[in-house]
Amino acid sequence: MSTLLAINTSPMTRTAVTRRLVQAFVCRWQERFPGGQVILRDLGVSPPPHLDERTLLAFSKPPAELADSDRNALRHSDELVSELLSADHVVIGSPMYNFTVTSGLKAWIDLVGRAGKTFDYTPEGPRGLLAGRQVFILTARGGFYAGDSADSGMDYQATFLRSYFAFLGIDDVRFVHAEGQGIDADTARQGEARAIGRLEALFAEGQVRRVA
């Protein structure tokens, strides 16, 4: 049975374009994988805590040496890592905030990046442990940053996320951008419509594949 981890990161609960895109993706995923499991994680409404000293120190301890206080410090990270490890597909609704990701998504990234769980350090360099999964990132941007846009050099969102998931061993990361959301109402609607069309094409063209 396939499992989808669906992550919303926008603090806006009623008007966020990325929430509508995630909902559309989940609906189409359920049609593609009937009977599959969907895990919903809302980092916008309930953002995880940022890393603190106790958690970082607990990260570095062998399991046999963990005290109760360490296990408590690791509680949030363990839960998020477990969700990620169980997923075949991950979809993330990611509005661009100041050319990159929301603070809630950054906190999630810091909590799931765990040596020995999602990646390993080896003599040959770091090795990701999550190979075989697919990640779909659905963005909303006030301006235009994709492709050969004049402002493409300011897109730290896509470059960061692609590099991070590659570090975890996931090289199949696909983006759907709803751009121009801050220009005017017509441009915003057109940008969202193009994003929905691109999202539907992912499924129609078989790009959302069954993970072995």
Image: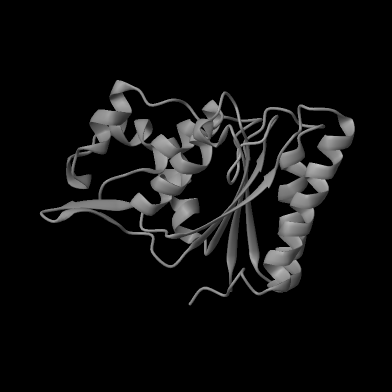
Judge by depth and name the residue closer to the eye, 76 or 157.
157
Q: What residue appears at the point 55 percent right and 37 percent down from the top-left corner?
A: 152
Compared to 193, does 59 lie above or below? Answer: above
Judge by depth and name the residue closer to the eye, 188 or 42.
188
* Residue 27 appears left or right of 164: right
Q: Position of residue 209 (x, y in %)?
A: 58, 73
Q: What residue appears at the point 84 percent right and 28 percent down from the top-left corner?
A: 184
Compared to 50, does 162 lie above or below? Answer: below
Q: What residue appears at the point 73 percent right and 41 percent down from the top-left corner?
A: 19
Q: Is residue 133 visible?
A: yes
Q: Position of residue 172 (x, y in %)?
A: 48, 62
Q: What residue appears at the point 46 percent right and 42 percent down from the top-left corner?
A: 159
Q: Which residue is the extreme one toward the left?
A: 123
Q: Is residue 117 visible?
A: no
Q: Position of residue 139 (x, y in %)?
A: 65, 42
The part of the image, by quadrant, that contains residue 143 is top right
The part of the image, by quadrant, that contains residue 72 is top left
Q: Which residue is the extreme one toward the right?
A: 186
Compared to 97, does 129 lie above or below? Answer: below
Q: Position of residue 151 (x, y in %)?
A: 58, 32
On-image quarter of the N terminus: bottom right
* Residue 167 appears left or right of 44: left
Judge by depth and name the residue closer to the eye, 127 or 162.
162
Give the color scheme: rainbow, by chain, secondary structure or one colour: one colour
* Residue 153 appears left or right of 209: left
